[in-house]
Structure formats: structure tokens, C-alpha cells
Amino acid sequence: HLTTRLEYEHHQKCLGNIEAMSCEDVSAALLTGVKDCLYAEPTVYDPLDPAPKCPFSVDEFTFDHRRRRFSLHNAHWLLWMAKACNLVEPAAIRQEFAARGFTDVEVLVKKRLTVAILEEDAYIVFAFKGSTGTADYLSNAAYIMDDTWKTSLPGRVHSGFFGTLDSGWPRLKVELLAARDTGKTVIFTGHSLGGACSQMAAMKAQRLGVDIAQIYNFATPRVGDQTFVDAFEKRFGDRFYRVNNGRDMAPHVPPSQAAEQAAIDTILGLIGDAEDPGLLLEAIAAILDFGLKFAAYTHAGDEYMFDEAGYFRALRPYDDTDEIPYWETLPELFKGEDIFEIFSELGVLPEYHDDGLQLCYQARAIHQLLYKRADL
């Protein structure tokens, strides 16, 4: 099973070239790198045609639970599943899944944690809900780090994110044990806060003997420190995919230590652009300065990057110092809106984080790879 038609045609072209060679030439070519073309996709693509209307339908794409390598098809479906959880009400979530033919869906709602559990003949998907209300945003803001003695996780993790997971963990644990006992493939996905919860849940689940085959997270904020990240990557590094839209602020918070001052300066500048920020500016400055001094956040896994126009830019190795240019150019990215406009319902942040357009970015890139590029 290959990720895209592009990959398939690339593979066939390589085989065709090899068929025309003598045995000696094939041996020499394999030693000089021709074999790599059987597996590697290009990292730069032609410009897209004008954007099609959003959203695309996920029905056009194939989900393969067996695939361990990164798949744009699987990413597209799993983002849709994660976003479906943002409907919040269990009946609405089940109805959304049923419209796509998924009828065996249980929705776990326990305090601040919501997880949709989709079971098919060969696999089970745990989709973690992202931020949808005041309680979630307050949880996101609680970025003081909790230690191992409190969480039983390696290293230190975001207090608010852990609190969300922990509020429903006893019930989720029961579902994970049941999934383990079926012997089916287990897959995790989550968007935003849901991505953070899925990372911590994966670490706890592996102690229960649950074999998680794939983890696809979207727009995920930083979850923990380097100790947590090292432990997570040791266990899931070959099956964890972190997909982001380049303009989205969520993957850049809490700021890394390398970009701490740049982030504080930018956020305060955005607040300062608002009319009459008053004492709020001073209060937020003190909170940010205090909290970040005692935090040491970093990301797990490399980043699968979609830029602000929706173009897929392939895998990008993670580097904390990459954060500094992002924060320095943030005011320009958000076209001069102040912080209150950015986070309001009518502001520009939801366009790149909370509504269905991010799903469309995935589809747009898949559409490009499947149908638009002929020159291999």
C-alpha cells in the first residue's frame, strides 16, 4: 500500500528503469543510490492550481490501519475523526461518524476529557477532542509543569493538559484495556488539546500493554520537557506524526526556552496594540515571565508542515530555535490584529486552528499529490 499515486508512479518508473539495465548495471546503480528512489518522495512540489472550495470530502481517500509510515490519506481521515469530537455532544459526534458509515462508536465524556472510540473489524481509533470552551482554554493557560510524582509520567508535563487527561483517565483506562484484549490495531489521534492528551495517554497506555500502531496529532502544543520527549520518542518515534499548519499559533505554545523572550515581547506587543490594555498588560507580562522561567517545554517528533497557503512542505526536523522567527513575524502573519481580535470568534486565529479549513489544507495537498503533478 503506497501513500499516494505520486509515490506509486515514482516506484513504477524506478522499476522500469531497472528492467532496462543489465545485472551488472543494476548492482552498480543500487550501490550509488538508485534504490533510494523506490521510497523517497520529492520534498518540493509544483504550485497548486487555484484552491478548490472547502471542505473536501474524506470519502475520496483511503484509510489503511496497517500502514506504519506517514500517509497523507491516513492523516486526512484521522484529522477528520479528531475534529468530529469538537461537536462535543455524544449524539452529534456519533451522528457525524455514522454519516461516513462508522456505526460502532462510543463517546467517552468524563469531566474535561472527551474521546471518541471508533471500532472496526481490524482496528480501533481513539480520537481526543480539542479545545472547545472556557474550561479547555483555562486548562491550556495552566502551563506550570507537573512533576513525575504527581503524573507518573517521565519528566515534567503541562499541568493543564495533564489535568484534562487525568479527569477522565479511570474511564479511559477501562476502554484501553478492552481494546488491548481484542487484539485489534490501536490508533490514536487528536487535534490541539486533544493531541496533547493523546501523547500523555499513549505513554500511560503502553504501561498497560496496549500496542499503539499509529499516532497522528494535529496543531499540537508542547506537552513536556526533554525528559518526557525522550521517553516518548523512544517508545513511539517510528509511529508518531505531528502535522501542523504553518500559521497556526497552537503548535508554538507554550514557547520553547530558546524563544521565550521573543514570544513574551510579541504577545505583549499584540496586547499593547489593543485599545486601553491598562493593567491587563502588566498582569499578563508578570504571569508569562514567572511561568516560563520555570518551564522547559519542547516538542516530540519532527513536523509535517503545511504552510499558510495549504501547500505540503514535507517533513521538517524540529529545532527549538525555529521558534524565534515565528514569534518575530507573528504580527505580520496576523495582519495587524491585536491579541483580543486574534482570539475572538471573529478573529483570524480560528480560521487557522478551530474550524474546518485546516482539514481542507490536508485535502488540498492530497489533491495536489494525487492528481496535479505529472512530472516525476
Image (spheres, grey):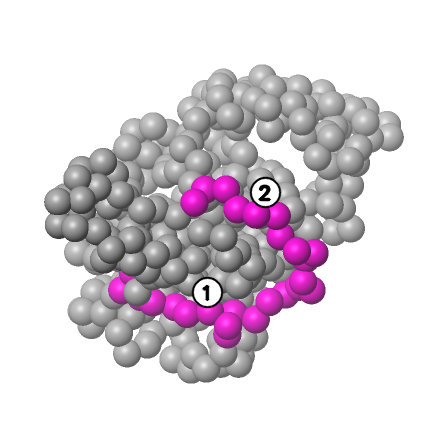
Residue 353 position within the rendered picture, expressed as x and y whole percent measured from the top left: 61, 49
Amino acid tagged 1: Trp
Q: Nearer the viewer, residue 290 or 1?
A: 1
Q: Main secondary structure of the magenta part?
A: loop
Q: Nearer the viewer, residue 72 or 340?
A: 72
Location of the N terminus by quadrant is bottom left
Q: Quadrant of residue 296?
A: top left
Amino acid tagged 2: Asp
Compared to residue 119, the image places residue 224 above or below, namely above
Q: Secondary structure at mark 2?
A: loop
Say which mark, if any, is on residue 307.
2
Residue 196 position within the rendered picture, expressed as x and y whole percent measured from the top left: 43, 46
Disc 1 marks which residue? 77
Q: CA distance from mark 1 to mark 2?
A: 20 Å
323 in magenta: no
Q: Which residues are magenta?
A: 42-68
Q: Is residue 337 left or right of residue 284?
A: right
Seen at 42% across and 82% down, the residue is 103
